[in-house]
Image: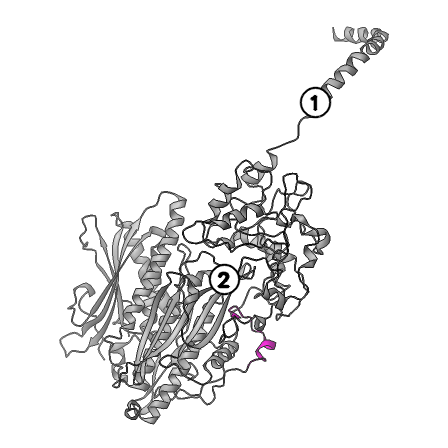
Amino acid sequence: AMDTDLSSQDRKDLDKFIKFFALKTVQVIVQARLGEKICTRSSSSPTGSDWFNLAIKDIPEVTHEAKKALAGQLPAVGRSMCVEISLKTSEGDSMELEIWCLEMNEKCDKEIKVSYTVYNRLSLLLKSLLAITRVTPAYRLSRKQGHEYVILYRIYFGEVQLSGLGEGFQTVRVGTVGTPVGTITLSCAYRINLAFMSTRQFERTPPIMGIIIDHFVDRPYPSSSPMHPCNYRAGEDNCAVYPSVEDSQEVCTTSFSTSPPSQCVFTVTKAHFQTPPPVVTDTLKVPVMGLAFSHQLSSSRLSYQPAALGVGSADMGYPVLFAGGLNAAHPHQLIGPGKEGGVPPIPSQPAHGTQADQERMCTPLDGVHYSAATPSSSEDTETVSNSSEGKCGSPHDLLETIFIRKVGAFVNKPINQVTMANLDIPFAMFAPKNVELEDNDPMVNPPDSPETESPLQGSLHSEGSSGSSTGNTHDDFVMIDFKPAFSKDDILPMDLGTFYREFQNPPQLSSLSIDIGAQSMAEDLDSLPEKLAVHEKNVKEFDAFVETLQ
Amino acid sequence: PCRTRCCAPPALSPAMNCRAEVLEVSVEGRQVEEAMLAVLHTVLLHRSTGKFHYKKEGTYSIGTVGTQDVDCDFIDFAYVRVSSEELDRALRKAVGEFKDALRSSGSDGMGQISLEFYQKKKSRWPFSDECIPWELWTIKVNVVNLANEQERQICREKVGEKLCEKIINIVEVMNRHEYLPKMPTQSEVDNVFDTSLKDVQPYLYKISYQITDSLGTSVTTTMRRLIKDTLAL
C-alpha cells in the first residue's frame, strides 16, 4: 500500500539512490581501512558523476564484491548489508574488529521528498560515515598494518552476525535517513576487547607465502564470502580482472545534476613504492621479511605495549625484535634457522629502519602481503588468550615450557614472573619476539615440539614446514626482550639491557685462575737458579748501566 | 545589493530557533590548534556543499566536495576535512588567533571558541540586515600544563580518545536532521551560503572566541571575527 503513494519515478529514483548509497558506503569503509590517507579533490563544476556530490573514488574490486553480495537486492527489513572488518596476523590468526551495518526498518516517512531531501540526507550520512570511520579503534590499527597483520574486509547481505566481536562490543550510530519506504540506518559495532583471542587452537602455522588477494580461504560459515585485504594496490593489470563501475546507465536524475556520470577509474593514492602485482608462490621464501619485521617493530610506535607472547618460532620471518648482542660473535646479526632450513642468514643491519630496508621489505611481495614464517615446530598448545582480566591459567604454564631465556639480566628471575607480567597486555601478539639460535648455549633446553598443520596452511602452502624444522631443536628459543627504562627505539642496538646482558658475565682473567697460578709458581721456582746464573754473567753490563745513571 | 556588517555578536544573538551545542576539551597548550581544527572541520564538513550553479528554469546543479584525511602531530588522532585550501586557511587563521589569545591571557588557560551558522535577512534602509543564527557550536577549552614526557604521552592518547567522542557527538547532532535553511533561489543564495570560496560552499558562518579570566567571567576582550567579510563583496 505504501508503494502507491510514491510515484513510479520517485520509486525508481529512491531505489537507485539506495543502491548507490550502499555501494558508496562500502567504498568509504574499505578505503578507510586501507591504511593510507585518503585525499580527493573538490570540483566546483558539477560533472554529474559524483554521487551525492561527494568525491568518493570507486575501487573496482570493492564495487564488484559489493554488487556480488547484494545480488541485485536492496537493503530491506531483515536483509542488511554488512561490511565486516577483521584483522589477520602473520601467524594466521584472525579477529573481527568491526561490523558496519546498513539496515532498513519499517518506519516510513511518506512526506519526505525523494529527489531532494532524501538525496541530501544520504549525502550528509556519507559525510558522517567519513568522519566516524576515523574514530573507531580499527582505524589506527589499519594505519599500521602491513607487516605483522593485515586488515581484511568481507561483505555479506542478510542477517547481521555480531558474535565474532567478543564481549562488550560497542555500537556507534552513524545516522539514519527516513524514506517513504523505510528508514535507512547506518551503524557500526566494534570490538573493544582488543586482547588477542584466537578462534582456533593456538597453533603454529608454517609461513603464509605469497598470498594473492583472492586466495584467502573462505570462513567456515555456510553463507560466508571470501575475505579481502583492505590495502589493495590496484595496478593496471589488476583492474582488468574486474569490470569497472558500469555507471553509464545509472545517472543521477535529480534536478540538480544533469550530465551522465563518467567511468570512475580508481587510482590508489600513491604508496611509498611501486610494487608488482601480487603473485602466488607456494615455495617462495622471503627471509628478508624477518628483518623487515624487526625494523618495523623497533621503529613503529605501537599503542599497545609490547610483550613477549609469541609462541615464538625460530623460523625466519617471524617478528623478531632487533637482536643486538644475542650473538656474541656478530652482535648485529640475526641468525636464521640456518643450516637445514634453507633460509639464508640475515646479514647485519642497523637497528633503525632505513629506506633501503623499507624497500627490501616490500619488493618481494606486494605491500598487501607479509610472510610470517610461523614456526614449524610447535607444541600442541591451548589457545593463549590475553583476556582483559589479564589472568592466564593454563596458558601460563604453556608458556613456561616454551619460553627459553638467554643468559642475561633477567636470568635469575623465574619464568613465571616474566611471562605473567606480559600476558595481561592486550594485543600481545604484536609483541616483538626475539629469536635466538645459538647452538651451544648451555642455558638452552628446548622442549620437544611436534609439528602441527593448520587447515589454512594446508590449503595455501604446499611445501609444508619441512624445510625449517629438520632436527633443529633450537627453534623454540624465544627471547623475551624487555625494554628497559629510558631505552629508545631508534638508537643503535646496544641499549642498556642488551649491554648489561652481554657483558654481565665476562670470562675470568687467566692470571686469577688458581690452577694456572699454581702452575706458574712452581715453574718460577724451578727456573730461579738458571736466571740467577744468567744475571751473574751479565753483572758487568748491569754495573755499567748503573754508572750511566749516576 | 548593499552589504552590511552583521549586527550582533554571536553570543548575544537572540536564540530563536537556534540550536546550541557545547563541547568541552582539556588539552595541552600545543594541542589547542589541532583539537580546534578537528572539531571545526568536522562540523564544516557536514555544513558545506558543492558550489551551486544555477541554470534556467530555477534549477541548479551542485559541485563536488572532496575530502582528505588529516593526521595530528600532537594528538593521537586523525580527522577528515573538506578539500578546500581556502576554508582550511580561514579556520587556521581563526584558531591561531584563539590560541595566541589563550596564551597571552595569562589566566588559567580557559576560553571558548564558537562557530555560528546564520542566515541573513534583508531589511529595508536604513535598517541593517539581520543575522539570524540557526546553529551555534561552542568549544570550551581548558589548557593544562604537564610536568614530564610521560604525562605528555598519556595526554596524547587521552585527548585523542576524547576527540573521538566529540566527533561521535557532532555526528549525532547532525543526524537529527533538524532545522536547515531552505535551499535558496539564486537571488537569495548569499543570504544562506558563503559563496566566496571557489571550490566549496559552506553555510554562512562566523567564528569568535572568548578568553575566560581566572575569575571565571568572560573577559571584555570578546573579539568577533567575520571570516567572510560581508563588506567586501
Q: Quadrant of the N terminus of chain B?
A: bottom left
Name the side, left or right, on which A482 lies relative to B92.
right
Q: Nearer the viewer, residue A391 or A14?
A: A391
Q: Which residue is mark 1?
A: A511
Q: Residue at x 34, y 51 (%)?
A: B28
Q: Residue at x 26, y 86 (%)?
A: A110
Instruction: Give, as a single range, the part of the protein colored magenta.
Output: A228-242
Q: Quadrant of residue A532?
A: top right
Neighbourhood count class around disc 1 (C-alpha, 10 Å): few under 14, some 14–19, many 20 upward? few
Name the chain under label 2.
Answer: A
Name the side, left or right, on which B151 lies relative to A549.
left
Q: Nearer the viewer, residue A139 or A427?
A: A427
Name the chain under label 1.
Answer: A
Can residue B80 be seen in this snapshot? no
Q: Quadrant of the C terminus of chain B?
A: bottom left
Amino acid under label 2? Thr
Specify whether residue A239 is painted magenta. Answer: yes
Cα separation, mark 2 vs mark 1, equals 60 Å
Q: Residue at x 32, y 86 (%)?
A: A115
Given this view, does label 2 or label 1 mark the residue nearer the observer?
2
Q: Which residue is mark 2?
A: A199
Where is residue B200 drawn, in percent x and y? Answer: 36, 75
